[in-house]
Image (cartoon, helix red, strand yellow):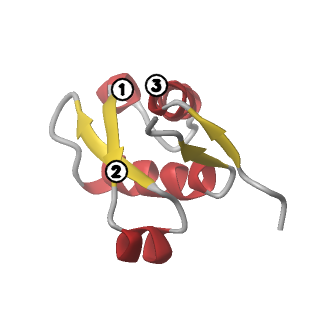
Amino acid sequence: MAAKRVVSPEEIVAVLNKALAESAALEGDCRECQVRRVGRVTDEEARQLGRNWNVDMVNGECGGECYDVLVDIAREVGGALDASWS
């Protein structure tokens, strides 16, 4: 497994938002959904998620298809990027 890059939380938000906007799985208003913030997780959550961050806030009520796509994108991004909280 390749080493993860450690970047700012803002960079992770930008990567997530770009992936959401470009996702072929989303249509219409769902393509406008944006992550506003990622937050820290506990050590136990980090082990379960495979990353040291999780989506903290989105603009809108993500549910159903939007939420499922966001979870998949976060899993993929989290495999490559961890957040630097310093």
Q: Total of numbered circles in the picture?
A: 3
The residue type indicated by label 2 comes to Arg
- Label 2, secondary structure: give it: strand
Q: Nearer the viewer, mark 1 or mark 3?
A: 3
Residue farthest right in this picture: 2
Q: Which residue is mark 2?
A: 40
* 10 Å crowding of disc 3: few (<14), some (14-19), many (20+): some
* 10 Å crowding of disc 1: few (<14), some (14-19), many (20+): few
- Image coordinates for residue 35, horizontal then vertical, percent: 34, 32
Screen quadrant of the N terminus: bottom right
State yes or no: discs 3 and 2 in contact (Cβ < 8 Å).
no
Q: Nearer the viewer, mark 2 or mark 1?
A: 2
- Label 3, secondary structure: give it: helix
Closer to the chain start, of discs 1 and 3, is: 3
Closer to the chain start, of discs 2 and 1, is: 1
- Image coordinates for residue 7, horizontal then vertical, percent: 60, 34
State yes or no: discs 2 and 1 in contact (Cβ < 8 Å).
no
The residue type indicated by label 3 comes to Glu
Q: Which residue is mark 1?
A: 28
Q: CA distance from mark 1 to mark 3?
A: 25 Å
- Left or right of 9? Residue 42 is left
Which residue is found at the position 61% from the left and 54% from the top?
A: 76
Q: CA distance from mark 2 to mark 1?
A: 31 Å
Closer to the chain start, of discs 3 and 2, is: 3
- Image coordinates for residue 8, horizontal then vertical, percent: 52, 30
Which of the numbered marks, if any, corresponds to residue 10? 3
Which residue is found at the position 52% from the left and 39% from the top?
A: 84
In the image, residue 52 sits, relative to residue 66, either above or below, namely below
Q: Is residue 43 or residue 60 the one in the foreground?
A: 43
- Label 1, secondary structure: give it: helix
